[in-house]
Amino acid sequence: MQTRVIVNGAQGKMGRLACETINNHPAFQLVAELGRGDNLQQSIIDTQAQIVVELTRADCVYENSLIIINNKAHPVIGASGLLPPQVEHLQTLSAEKKWGGIIVPNFSIGAILMMHFAAIAARFLPEVEIVEAHHQQKLDAPSGTAMKTAEMIDAARRDKKNALPLKALIAGARGAHHCNVNIHSLRLPGILAQQQVIFGSLGETLTLTHNSIDRSSFMPGLLLACEQVQHLDKLYYGLEYLLAIE
Amino acid sequence: MQTRVIVNGAQGKMGRLACETINNHPAFQLVAELGRGDNLQQSIIDTQAQIVVELTRADCVYENSLIIINNKAHPVIGASGLLPPQVEHLQTLSAEKKWGGIIVPNFSIGAILMMHFAAIAARFLPEVEIVEAHHQQKLDAPSGTAMKTAEMIDAARRDKKNALPLKALIAGARGAHHCNVNIHSLRLPGILAQQQVIFGSLGETLTLTHNSIDRSSFMPGLLLACEQVQHLDKLYYGLEYLLAIE
Amino acid sequence: MQTRVIVNGAQGKMGRLACETINNHPAFQLVAELGRGDNLQQSIIDTQAQIVVELTRADCVYENSLIIINNKAHPVIGASGLLPPQVEHLQTLSAEKKWGGIIVPNFSIGAILMMHFAAIAARFLPEVEIVEAHHQQKLDAPSGTAMKTAEMIDAARRDKKNALPLKALIAGARGAHHCNVNIHSLRLPGILAQQQVIFGSLGETLTLTHNSIDRSSFMPGLLLACEQVQHLDKLYYGLEYLLAIE
Amino acid sequence: MQTRVIVNGAQGKMGRLACETINNHPAFQLVAELGRGDNLQQSIIDTQAQIVVELTRADCVYENSLIIINNKAHPVIGASGLLPPQVEHLQTLSAEKKWGGIIVPNFSIGAILMMHFAAIAARFLPEVEIVEAHHQQKLDAPSGTAMKTAEMIDAARRDKKNALPLKALIAGARGAHHCNVNIHSLRLPGILAQQQVIFGSLGETLTLTHNSIDRSSFMPGLLLACEQVQHLDKLYYGLEYLLAIE
């Protein structure tokens, strides 16, 4: 018997791809594609949805997440707009109800592995810089992934190596300084999303490169979340737990 | 008080660098630089060496290792000439004596991390190829590191994906086939030793690149082995245990 | 006034993109999208087309090209199925009529620059290998671009350096041997089309990398061909002439 | 008969390598290795040197160059300390005397090709960023090569594309802005000198990468300059003329 899934935020690029992916998977039945103006609560009740994939980017992610949990659907929350106290409250609520859910800031398994490896390598090779490149429609720099990678590197380093002082003939040459890691952001056509983490040591370098050329790279992670979320007994943060990398 | 160290095989490129590195380190005293024609056993007795760094490439590695252990010096064996039953016998002997030693096929911490990460990534991204590039004096292809990486990948893959059949308009285009991994070997000037492990998945790639430009890349691993070998109670294989990556 | 354009082979991936691109360009009017079963000659007469973009992959490219020229439309021939004597005959015919046309084996400006630079670099750095990577649906290996690059390199090299003999522990490790250049072909998901040309010399390497993530990379070259083809007085081979790189 | 060569500035890393290279070449005889305190003029007279390789880094490059020309030796000037009016005066002097010489800011043939190709590619692909990486002893950022590359790119671009405004969440993320090209400078151990010039266009990227792992990469260019300098009839700037790339 198929699991009934709603996609909320179905009109965006990611939403349309999610609908197509779930539609094509034998284990799932796409019971509703919702957008602005649709009533999420009513739709969960009407369709008896077991999972809601929440992909809206708006300010309503938190309210939507409450609705999903309170109406006994399992949330797979791909939106990035939640504040730390909101995450905490949703996790407390889910734990009380022993109710499975997952917040997924990044569905790409390749990107998660890159960050995981970066944190391990930083223990042995503390001198490191990050180069990330994205399409020109991306307005913020550095990317969220680059900043999170820098934070994970800094937390893992045993020798808290200070990066070199940011001397430069021209301001900006040595990049942005975040958590003692220099980050360099390129914005060019012909690239979707790319990140390099370059570790330098005596006579050698170790470079981790993730390159995403298509949003389809998020679909294996999305399916994994949908397959596992009903078997969880609290609200997890990040796909890492499901991957069981350790 | 300094630890007394002999370097056996001190005339090779690696040996000279090892002598220089140990000489410059405050914790160690280089008590002998031995080559062909020197008597290793006599030298251990005369110098009361506590550690022997064994870097000879010849057929005498096994005999030298026995001499080192039987004369109560701790062996750091960097040579690659040992056969599996020889390794096993040395390990049995060391275990009986509760005597610390280490065999190190690769002293580069960057290369060890690359292989370790490749084995983890292969569990999630089973489709992978290896490209290695070395200087033109390297006669064998693929490199030992590439073949070991392929073996680790294949052992870690849960889905035993067969690589595509090796169709090619021109023989060799799809590389060497080892443990269901295609390996491509480049031999060019301007490169010392380089390896890329490229994982491909839906819409994304994850690439691990190790680049060594100088034999000095082996020295941090050599020093780590010398620092730890006296505290071990058996003969370990590979630097991984000392790194405690897991 | 807009130039009237027919796209022949409009149902393929490339054809659909060509139609969309020409439709969206103010200088052009897409007057017909033809596929199998449509009558090309009749369509040229009916629509008074000035340009035909010929993208069929079938055996009929040569016949179609004759029809286009004889019916006084300018051909932009993107298909790769023409044999050398067919190309020659079409060029002779066009020259007699002083009629402009162009055969474009590769519409990507980046790929053309890569090959052009490879031929220049080979004069100074004769030792070189090629690594190309494509999606797994590509059945042939090496790619046509890789083989053409090798041919251009070999023609340009002043020192006809023989590549090293193809010694390998495992057959295929040293790649395919074409025009004294070793070519290595990877086939992985997550990649559309990629090529690296790696020149090695004493203490340095120079690498040319072309990466295509989307068929849209062919559109600037297609538009350039359509803009220029009416001003030509013979049938050119390759986009190089229009780029005027030299 | 061998050509008599003096190396001035023979004690630096580059100087020692130059002496070794000239010594090992059958066409040349190394007649003096000079350093601080040696008398260049007297040495030219005493040795009847035909060529002086000027590698001093000090403020005396200009005076030395005058001495070399006035004493009828051919200068190969590798030092970078000359100011534009000094270069101009040396060129005027050489032209009057019809005396051959060459100023070589960069002896690496790979680096020269990279810059040459960057200028060509910029005509067709105007959107570009530069990433350069060097060892941590290099104090200035961006590198001189990166800045010269940006200048050459900007001079060659037909569409004077302005780079995106330097918006950044963290200052420096978008790099240094030089001649409408963003430059990113990495400083890490395990790297000697590396530069990537990344051109982005619709659906594709073209990347030129130069990687130098050893100062030996300068020697083919040095020998080329020594072989040709006697046949020149004025003072050239840059190795490009001798390469005859065009």
Image (cartoon, coloured by chain):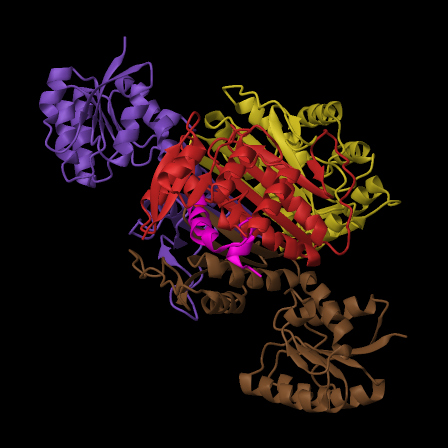
Chain colours: A brown, B red, C yellow, D purple
Residue A92's spot in the image, x, y percent?
63, 89
Q: Position of residue C60 (x, y in %)?
A: 83, 35
Q: Which residues are magenta?
A: B218-246
Q: Main secondary structure of the magenta part?
A: helix
Image coordinates of residue B189 in percent, x first then y, are 48, 31
Question: Is residue B114 located in the magenta-colored stretch of the structure?
Answer: no
Question: Which residue is painted at 65% across and 63% down in the image?
Answer: A109
* Above-or-below relation of B179 to C179: below
Q: Nearer the viewer, residue B204 or B39?
A: B39
Q: Is residue A236 left or right of residue B134?
A: right
Up/down of D193 relative to B159, above or below:
above
Residue D190 visible in the picture: yes
Residue C197: x and y in percent read 56, 36
Count of marks overlaid on the render: 0
Residue drawn 70% across and 30% down?
A: C171
Q: Residue furthest top?
A: D1
Q: If the image is split into quadrants, where does the C terminus of chain A sit?
A: bottom right
Q: Is residue C189 visible?
A: no
The one nearer the camera, A105 or A161, is A161
- Going by the image, does B141 lie left or right of B31? right
Above or below: residue D61 compared with residue C26: above
**Which residue appears at 83% of the width and 47% of the height?**
C35
Q: Tell which of D62 and D26 is nearer to you.
A: D26
- At horizontal 34% and vertical 32% (from top left) the residue drawn is D107
Q: Taking D215 as reference, is B161 left or right?
A: right
Q: Quadrant of the N terminus of chain A?
A: bottom right
Quarter of the figure with residue C108 = top right
Q: In the picture provided, is B241 more to the left or to the right than D94?
A: right
